[in-house]
Image (cartoon, rainbow, N blue to C red):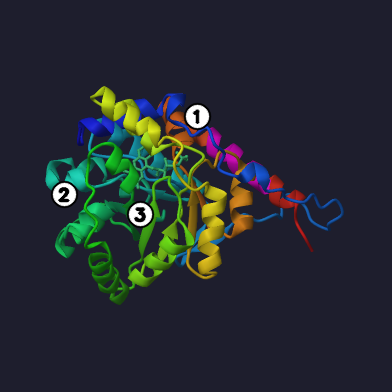
């Protein structure tokens, strides 16, 4: 099943709880230390940050999810409005369908709702590996007036759904792409979707010349389970569930990247569910934390619920930084 029907099925399945990992993202093993006697006020505790030369009001991102269908357009609009309002980053879902059917481009075009937000375009590593032209990559970037590009890596998900599994030219084509955009000072990020990055994978991505990484790990939405729940046949369903718990937990994935590079701009996704999780991801070395499924659940209820979720996350983050602040 390929998009756009797949896009709708993904949204529907992700509204239910069965798509989540049982194993933890690892933040429950990270303790932030209470600091009881600091000379600070909650009001002056700042959560602002700089990322890719842009000032963000908080180190948070609405992770890439959708586009290509009308419901996806409505959701992208809501998330873009929220990104603008809260001064956070946002990514659209894979734009492959819009390159194949340009009339679907409008479902990704939400820049007018977020004129100042940091917006990421999104394409798949499989497409790059199979030789997607630089012209088409540029089309995807222009389509959403993006500030940066995500190339998503999801080999296990693709294999479970009998999708794109030929990555033989990955390094060659990714290196070419990264070189091209490095000359234009336009950031190309590699992002796992939920299976995490090992130190070896991180080294390989850095050698390809990526300008940043999203190390999305296990512990939140499991994309093998999503494919199992969307499968058309019983055998594919079983195969998806066999890999349902596959992947490096997000906390470990952050450590793996930082073990290899202290400098590379790093986003952490996968099982980030609370303001304290955001603070823990930052304490392990991420520059931004990013959330998908919780943003979907809230946006599904409506704009007020989405805004309330983000407001509460940011307040919890602020209280966490206030309570664990060191002089
Ligand atoms: C409905 C839905 C669709 C998604 N589609 C994409 C996509 O098109 N491209 C991508 O890079 N990641 C996609 N993701 C993956 C998320 O960005 C994220 O990496 C993953 O869901 C783990 O984060 P979470 O535990 O907060 O959900 C999607 C996630 C959801 C929930």
Vertical side of 306 occupied by 324: above or below? below
Spatial separation of the CA atoms under disc 2 and disc 1:
32 Å
Secondary structure, magenta segment, majority class: helix
Residue 238 occupies which quadrant of the picture? top left
Whether the residues at callouts 2 and 1 have beta carbons within 8 Å, the answer is no
Q: Which residue is mark 3?
A: 120
Q: Which residue is mark 1?
A: 305
Q: Residues within 10 Å of mark 1 (few under 14, many from 20)?
A: some
Q: Residues within 10 Å of mark 3 (few under 14, many from 20)?
A: many
Q: Residues within 10 Å of mark 2 (few under 14, many from 20)?
A: some
Q: Does the magenta portion include 171? A: no
Q: Locate residue 29 relative to residue 194 in the image: left or right.
A: right
Quarter placement of the N terminus: top left
Vertical side of 105 occupied by 129: above or below? below
Vertical side of 277 occupied by 143: above or below? below
User: Where residue 169 sits: x, y (%)?
Assistant: 21, 63
Give the quarter the ligand 1 occupies. Answer: top left
Q: Which residue is mark 2?
A: 99
Spatial separation of the CA atoms under disc 3 and disc 2:
16 Å
Identify the residue at horizontal 54%, vertical 56% (top origin).
Answer: 254
User: Where residue 211 sits: x, y (%)?
Assistant: 39, 68
Label 1 element class: helix
First in sequence: mark 3 or mark 2? 2
Residue 142 showing in the rendered view: no
Q: Residue furthest bottom?
A: 183
Q: Locate residue 36 relative to residue 223 in the image: left or right.
A: right
Spatial separation of the CA atoms under disc 1 and disc 3:
24 Å
Q: In this rendering, which labeled residue sits more in front, label 2 or label 1?
A: 2
Identify the residue at horizontal 19%, vertical 43% (top origin).
Answer: 97
Residue 123 showing in the rendered view: yes
- The stretch in magenta equals 308-318
């Amino acid at each position: 099943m390929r998009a756009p029907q797949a896009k709708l099925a993904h949204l529907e399945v992700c509204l239910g709880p069965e798509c989540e990992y049982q194993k933890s993202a690892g933040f429950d093993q990270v303790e932030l230390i209470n600091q009881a006697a600091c000379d600070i006020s909650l009001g002056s505790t700042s959560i602002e940050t700089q990322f890719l030369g842009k000032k963000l009001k908080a180190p948070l991102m609405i992770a890439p999810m959708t586009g290509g269908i009308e419901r996806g357009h409505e959701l992208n609009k809501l998330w873009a409005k929220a990104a603008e309002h809260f001064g956070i980053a946002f990514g659209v879902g894979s734009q492959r369908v819009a390159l194949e059917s340009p009339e679907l481009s409008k479902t990704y075009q939400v820049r007018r709702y977020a004129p100042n937000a940091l917006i990421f375009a999104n394409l798949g590593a499989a497409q790059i590996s199979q030789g997607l032209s630089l012209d088409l990559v540029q089309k995807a970037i222009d389509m959403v007036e993006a500030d940066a590009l995500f190339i998503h890596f999801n080999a296990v998900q693709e294999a479970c759904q009998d999708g794109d599994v030929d990555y033989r030219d990955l390094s060659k084509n990714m290196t070419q792409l990264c070189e091209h955009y490095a000359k234009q000072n336009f950031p190309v990020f590699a992002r796992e979707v939920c299976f995490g990055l090992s130190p070896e994978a991180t080294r390989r991505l850095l050698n390809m010349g990526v300008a940043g990484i999203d190390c999305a790990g296990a512990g939140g939405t499991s994309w093998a389970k999503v494919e199992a729940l969307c499968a058309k046949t019983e055998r594919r369903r079983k195969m998806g569930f066999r890999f349902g718990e596959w992947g490096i937990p997000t906390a470990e994935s952050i450590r793996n990247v930082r073990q290899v590079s202290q400098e590379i701009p790093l986003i952490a996704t996968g099982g980030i569910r609370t303001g304290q999780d955001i603070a823990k991801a930052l304490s392990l070395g991420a520059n931004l934390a990013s959330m998908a499924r919780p943003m979907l659940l809230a946006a599904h209820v409506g704009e007020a619920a989405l805004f309330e979720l983000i407001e509460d996350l940011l307040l919890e983050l602020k209280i966490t930084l206030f309570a664990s602040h060191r002089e």
